[in-house]
Amino acid sequence: MASQFRLLRMLESRLHDGDLCNIDALLGCPLYYPRQDVFDKFESLSQKEQHAALSCLFFTINWFRELINAFVTQKDKDLKRKLYGRLRQVIELEQMLWQKLPKCPNYTPPLAVFDLDTSMLSPSLKVTNKKKGQRGRKPAAGKAKKGKGNVNENTRLDTQANSQVATPATPQPTATAAGDKAETTENEVASAVDPSSCRPFFRELHFDVFGLLFRKLSVDVNSKPEGLMTIAELEFLLTDLNMKLSHMFTGGKRAIGFGDGASKNIGYSHLDIFTAAEVAGRAHSYLKPVCVHLEAISFFFQSLIADNDGIVDAPVIYSDQTRPLMSVNTLLFNTLSIFLSWPGLQKEESKGTLTAVLRTIAKRLEGDSVNTMEQDELTSVTFKYLSKFHESVVNIDAATTLVQALVALTAFPCVDNLYEKLVEVTEELLKREWYKNRGEKEKGSSYNQNIVTLLEIYLKYGSNTLQLVYTLCTVGFAEFTNASGRDPHSDTFPTLNKGTMSIYYRCMMCSLVTGTKKNLSLLGSASDADRKKYMEVWSTAINIFSVLITTLKNYDSKGLLGPSLKYSRCFLELFLRSAMPVLDSSLRMYNQEVMVLLKNMQSSTRLLQHVCTHSKVNQDTSLTRYVPPLKRCLETLVYRVKTMLVINKCSQAFWLGNLKNRDLQGEELLTQAAREDSEGEDDEQQPELNDDEQSDVDLEVEECERGNSSSSNSLIKAQGDVSSNYEVSY
């Protein structure tokens, strides 16, 4: 019936220039619908009755969706009031649907999208089931608890491999939801349905519907004031808007055909009539209410923090009442991020749209003066406006999305250096402690992913990445390693804790290589004048490398060992390629500096040898695959240092000896000791060395006379190992 009504209203709109007064009674027309007690006792119904009740929900929701599509363009105030009433009913009915669907396995909803090949559908609803309050072993096969439906069963809904990222609507307090919540215990199964999986079974909302965003927002989640938009309504509209913008601007439209590519267009048939540029031209006007709602929510949290004497982790800030506001705040920033990240904005034909977008946002800060500004000035003002919100953001999801929007702005021409401002904002966010509901500290995979995003942006866009990594090493890591207690963390960077250490370590190891390359490229060729600067860059890089590798003595988790093996090879290859040629020509002029630099490198490569041994002994394939290429680099480095000494006519200063296999703590491995006992005769032929001399490689400065000359040069004498395990030694 919904599709037939759409045809009717399209004809009426065409015949009467958009006026739907002849059929406006349908907007408030009552419906025959199952009583509430039918859903209250849903579990006790027969399967046929359950399916009928669920179908009624789908039919009612789709009817209301088409009513909203039809009458959203009407100007009559009474129609607008009824329209918002239907919108609220859609939200309430969908919330009820999410609760009842997991309880009815193998249910197939009625299709609402008919422009697709139904023979290719393979419905399967994505339902996430979680057992709350219970941890332990998984039950054995065949011993699953019996009941109406197994927790692994799928309701037949999802018809596609959905690639769009959708933010599920946060359930709002309703009579039904409150009742269900009261009956839920920690040991009950909590099911969550991905709303995006229902696209083939819901009527598509037209783009005109987002004109409802212009209504003033009420930040009180417990009330439904007349004439104001509720948080639930705003969340519903923003979720759908972001899915549509993602489809047009990031996923790209695909022609209807066979396979998964065609399924990604399901639910966007009306939207796909337009090009991405046309959608941008229409959608940029919605950025004004987005900014207005951002300001309202920002003011709410600023007032809340001020009322609690500036205490950010006060319980009232992280309550059930503020959680929906945090979710909506994230969606608002996501709208801006998706729009500003669209590559088409940087094209010449979209210059007018870009200017309009920037002017719409910048006007919130500078007023009508933006009408005379050029595009580069507008970019600067827009960045300044958005960056101010980081002070009032209280959840890390919103903070990360805000930073992503700021990153998108840096791609546009600007009069200021936005990169430094971006790094400042990101650094402040990394230096904050983040909390979740009821004031508990944030943790988990989602939190870790946000830290990855912030940290990568922080290290990527800094003008001196190497110095940023050095600060993290000397300040953040030092504070963390010296911290005590069950939850050690850095005081300067609270986001650096036991749960995120591996994230920081991986990002720092990667940025060490890229940062060193960046600093070397700024110096250009290694001329005699710049040779000292080259060595200073490498001195900083090697000091960082030494701190990161030495950390493995105390923290030897796979999350740290993997990045150390992977990126150490890249760092050593860069050292061989860029540093060694400079050291060749600097050994005589800066002999002390070269010696210190190589000695610091030597202490790190010695421990790297132990890391390789540790990985082989534990037979961890995820680690051992990095060992052969790393060992080749270590071997190459040994002989490259010998080449440097030969070039400077000091080859007699290079010496190789046996090195014992040791673990990360420096303890000798028993297998190696046993092998050495059986090879006593061979050992007698080697110079007598104590254990420290056999396991370490020392650098010394000695006088080297050449011919009859009385002058002396500082040279390097080294001991090393060229056995089954190579030590970088000079």
Image: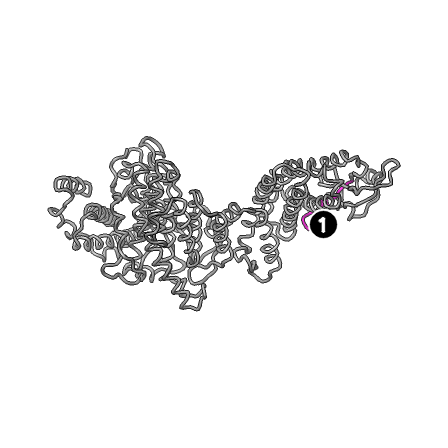
Amino acid carrying label 1: it is Glu
Give the camera-side residue of 224 and 662.
224
Number of labelled discs?
Answer: 1
Report which residue position mark 1 lands on: 667
- Location of residue 318 in the rendering, given as x and y in whole percent from the top left corner: 41, 62
Q: What stretch is highlighted in magenta?
A: 657-670
Residue in the picture at 62% in, 54% down: 474
In the image, is residue 661 part of the stretch drawn in magenta? yes
Give the camera-side residue of 448 and 291.
291
Seen as rendered, the residue at the extreme right is 708
**Mark 1 residue crowding within 10 angstroms, few (<14) / some (14–19) / many (20+):** few
Figure check: 562 above or below 430: above
Residue 369 placement, left or right of 692: left
Residue in the picture at 36% in, 54% down: 366
- Location of residue 264 in the rendering, given as x and y in whole percent from the top left corner: 34, 37
Dominant SS in magenta: loop
- Location of residue 637 in the rendering, given as x and y in whole percent from the top left corner: 69, 37
Identify the element where label 1 is drawn. Answer: loop
Residue 169 placement, left or right of 721: left
- Location of residue 508 in the rendering, given as x and y in whole percent from the top left corner: 57, 47
Mark yes or no: residue 669 visible: no
Seen as rendered, the residue at the extreme front is 372
Q: Which quadrant holds the N terminus? A: top left
Q: Which quadrant holds the C terminus? A: top right
Residue in the picture at 18% in, 41% down: 6
